[in-house]
Image: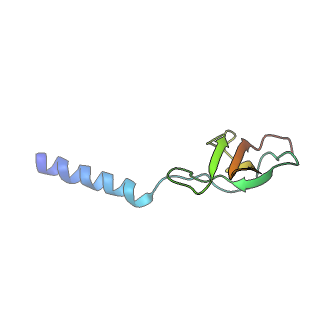
């Protein structure tokens, strides 16, 4: 019984590993950015980076897009694209 459970558990975990994490689809944005920002695809920003991110670290409206503005000292300011189209 333990062997069957172990095999099923390994198969289940392997299926999740093979599919990878679910990422937001990059369809059409549901909102726009203010003139000082650029519209970008939302990405996973975990781990080390050459620049620093401030502001939001997730897509609040779930459309796969976010607004970004370059600031001095290699900072990126992120806000959600929430202005009406």
Q: Position of residue 29 (x, y in %)?
A: 76, 51
Residue at screen point 88% across, 48% down: 35
Is residue 36 found left or right of 59 in the rendered image? right
Q: Position of residue 10 (x, y in %)?
A: 25, 53
Colour basis: rainbow
Residue at screen point 32% across, 57% down: 14
Task: Work out whether residue 34 or residue 74 is closer to the camera in this orientation and state it.
Answer: 74
Task: Work out whether residue 44 or residue 76 is closer to the camera in this orientation and state it.
Answer: 76
Q: Residue furthest front?
A: 73
Q: Quadrant of the N terminus?
A: top left
Q: Position of residue 61 (x, y in %)?
A: 70, 40
Residue at screen point 16% across, 50% down: 4
Residue at screen point 51% across, 54% down: 48
Q: Position of residue 9 (x, y in %)?
A: 25, 49
Is residue 49 found left or right of 6 in the rendered image? right
Is residue 35 found left or right of 56 in the rendered image? right
**Residue 45 appears in the picture as rendered:** yes
**Residue 1 appears in the picture as rendered:** no
């Amino acid at each position: 019984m333990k062997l069957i459970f172990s095999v099923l558990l390994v198969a289940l975990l392997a299926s999740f590993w093979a599919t990878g994490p679910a990422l937001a689809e990059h369809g059409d944005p549901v909102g726009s950015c203010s003139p000082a920002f650029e519209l970008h695809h939302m990405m996973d920003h975990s781990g080390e980076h050459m620049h620093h991110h401030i502001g939001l670290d997730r897509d609040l409206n779930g459309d796969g897009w976010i607004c970004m503005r370059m600031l001095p000292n290699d900072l990126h300011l992120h806000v959600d694209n929430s202005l009406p189209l």
